[in-house]
Amino acid sequence: MSKLKKHPPDYQEELDRLIYTKDYMESILELAHTSKDQVQENIKDAFTNLDYLDSSLSYINILTNSRLLDMIQGDLRQLIKMKENPYFGRIDFIPADSAMPEKYYIGKFSLYRKDNQEPIVVDWRSPVANLYYDGRLGQVSYQAEERERFGDLNLKRQYVIEEGDLEEIRDIDVTSRDELLQKSLSEKSDKRLNDIVATIQEEQNRVIRQDLQKPMIVQGVAGSGKTTIALHRLSYFLYQYQDKLSPDKVMILAPNNMFIDYISQALPDLGVEKITQTTYNEYVQACIRTKINMIDSTLKLKDLLETTSENKEETIIVSQLKGSIKYESVMKEYLIDIIKNYVPKEDLYIGKFKFFSYKKIQKLFLKDYRYLTIDQRKEKINQLLKKEFKSKKKEIIDKIEEKFEEKYESILFKYQDAEERKVHSITLLDNKEQRLKEVKAETFKTISQYMRKFPKHSSIDYYKNLLTDEKLFKQYSQDILDESEIDLILKQTAETVKKNQFETEDLAGILYLQAKLFGIPEDFKMKYIVIDEGQDYSLFQYRALAIANQTRLFTILGDLAQGIHQYRGTNNWEDILNHLLPKANYITLQKSYRTTIEIMDLANQLLMNQANNLPLAEPVVRHDNKPQMLECKTDEEIFSRCTQLIDELNQHNYTSIAFITKTEKEAEELTHKFNNDSTFEVQLLQGKEAMSKNIVIVPAHLAKGLEFDVAILVNMNTRYNTNELETKLLYVAITRACIDYISLVKSRLPFN
Ligand SMILES: Nc1ncnc2c1ncn2[C@@H]1O[C@H](COP(=O)(O)OP(=O)(O)OP(=O)(O)O)[C@@H](O)[C@H]1O
């Protein structure tokens, strides 16, 4: 890269361009403000003139103006965001079929001249902007409107514009190191997860723009930008499908609410609004429209980390089974029987007339309507019965008349005596009248009564029933699971489920039953789903999600090396590729952007100790302090080093410092100490709250996905063992640091 010092040849031209852009934006902003005032005025007028008797016109007026106001406000928000930094890059492209160079300034949002549609700034997500990220100088091409445009890229330029002033200009080519990236990485930011549109790297760009019609799995090392890429891909997706898909059909799943808060701060800047951001747990509850009493999902991890009980092995087996395709098969067998036994086993009579046989209704339910959920099948049958009843009513009456006619004739024939004949005839007539009255009076009540005999269980009821009824569970699982597996699942689940308590591992089964039996509400049916920390979800969780949403458009990002929830998650991507997304693009990211070479070298030692043979991370060249390992003798000494470190680090103006403990208990103890014995304000992170302080204390498993300028690992009464789970946990903890990593221990960590 050649940084153009102070006055590059076209410096004045660039300055003029910036002034022109800013002036134009200013004029558009003014216009937008005026239109906003005008539209607001229109709405006010419409409300004042609202005539309650004939209000349709006023309502239309209000509606139109409200939509206009929404649009103007959206434009205004974008313009305000752009004002300080209207663009960050430029490319000069000479199309092969013309000698006229096309100059494109690239920014976060596009800006067109209203009079002639000339692009002043093009959006980073537009097709031509791909050349900025992907194209090398020389011959290039890009895809626009189904057609490939060939040409020469003869300039790629970066700008640093701060508060509207042009600070730096750099021309780049592929061989040069990206200084803007270095600058952006070394900057301490109080806002984590910045948008990175100016410095997206080639491999990241490929993930962001990868075929949106296909699922994708990204395995990326810690700090490779997975979360950041997930958000940018969402932004790209919404831009590409802005006219075809509403953002509320797009969902991002994250591990907990603290993480959602963390990512949601970055979304508005990327133009991503109104998408669903939730956790798997909350999503399932929304789908079944019922609050589930969930057992804290971290308890199991805590158990695995803190206790030495022999049950560990069993706990892991049960969690893995519940996330497996075998468990789905058990649910499937169960489901087949639920559906088979759903229709009440009786014929439907209207009076004494057999209106519909069980067999006939069962056929409708199982065959004719099999493409519908059982709720929908039930409704269809209800409607059909009512319709049939209307048309059959006359037929039934005729039949009764006919029958009585026959009986009457036999009376005439049987009784010669006039008096006797009369008595019998009168009785018969009375009976007939009574019968007809009954039939006529028989309204839809009979059908309603019949419909009420269908079961009324919810998906939770069914799930609970299966796991608390030993005989039932065995019946459906005996050909799928081993006897010991069946016993283990029952042993570990029956008691809690009986008390209406469920674990994360149960959610896939509940969602599966809900989707297959009743379907999920339309508002929660997504078309496109992005899943971060994807290694934490089981195959069955993914499959249930796909069945419920009837989509395979998943973008899954994760890192198996950070799979601390591996007991209930995924430990290889092949399973998901083979059993759910065979057409998915599988991409690996090895470059790590978060942290320094010194810290990543340490983390790589832990990667080498892992069984999954993952390639080592390649840190983007950036040096800083060597990680420090400070051995202390007592808890008091550890605590006093903690406070000393804060004093020292504060002098470097670090914006975020995290004390990362191995367990929750230790995090609580440390917080207690800080609150009692120091004046520092610290925040204990527990997974639900937003991060609001610069100094946080967090157990390692909750720090996953987050990052801090400095990570200080504190081990007072704990140490990381060399087993798989704890190696992963330590890997997570170490890779949270952007700049400095310090470890305070009473005994050295295993790999030193
Ligand atoms: N191209 C880039 N330009 C600037 N910063 C980047 C770039 N790519 C990633 N980063 C920064 O690197 C850091 C790590 O990114 P991110 O948290 O998205 O990684 P991750 O793969 O999700 O990490 P982990 O799995 O460890 O949680 C973030 O601060 C992000 O802003």
Image (cartoon, rainbow, N blue to C red):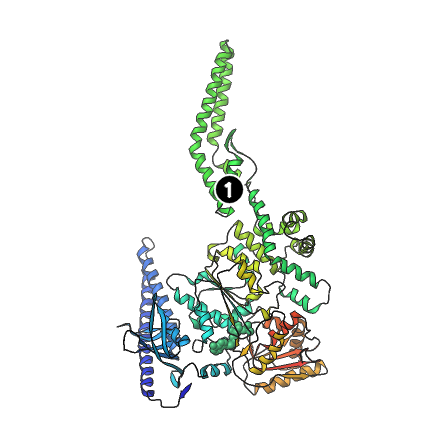
Count of labels shown?
A: 1
Q: The N terminus is located in which quarter?
A: bottom left
- Is residue 557 placed above or below 374 in the rendered structure? below
Label 1 sits on a secondary structure element that is: helix
Residue 64 appearing in the image: yes
> 166 left or right of 595?
left
Q: Quadrant of residue 569?
A: bottom right
Question: Mark 1 highlights which residue?
Answer: 365
Q: Residue furthest top?
A: 417
Q: Quadrant of residue 146?
A: bottom left
Residue 448 appearing in the image: no
- Is residue 630 placed above or below 402 in the rendered structure? below
Q: Please state which amino acid type lies under the numbered disc 1.
A: Phe
Q: Position of residue 633 (x, y in %)?
A: 72, 83
Q: Position of residue 374 (x, y in %)?
A: 51, 46
Q: Residues within 10 Å of mark 1 (few under 14, many from 20)?
A: many
- Which residue is rendered at x = 50% and y = 19% of the image? 428
Q: Nearer the viewer, residue 682 or 601?
A: 601
Q: Residue furthest left?
A: 115
- Which residue is rendered at x = 46% and y = 64% of the image? 275
> 663 left or right of 537?
right
- Which residue is rendered at x = 57% and y = 66% of the image? 535
Q: Is mark 1 within 8 Å of ligand 1?
A: no
Q: Quadrant of residue 729?
A: bottom right
Q: Position of residue 508 (x, y in %)?
A: 57, 57
Q: Nearer the viewer, residue 675 or 352?
A: 352
Q: Residue furthest bottom?
A: 6
Q: Position of residue 183 (x, y in %)?
A: 47, 83
Q: The C terminus is located in which quarter?
A: bottom right
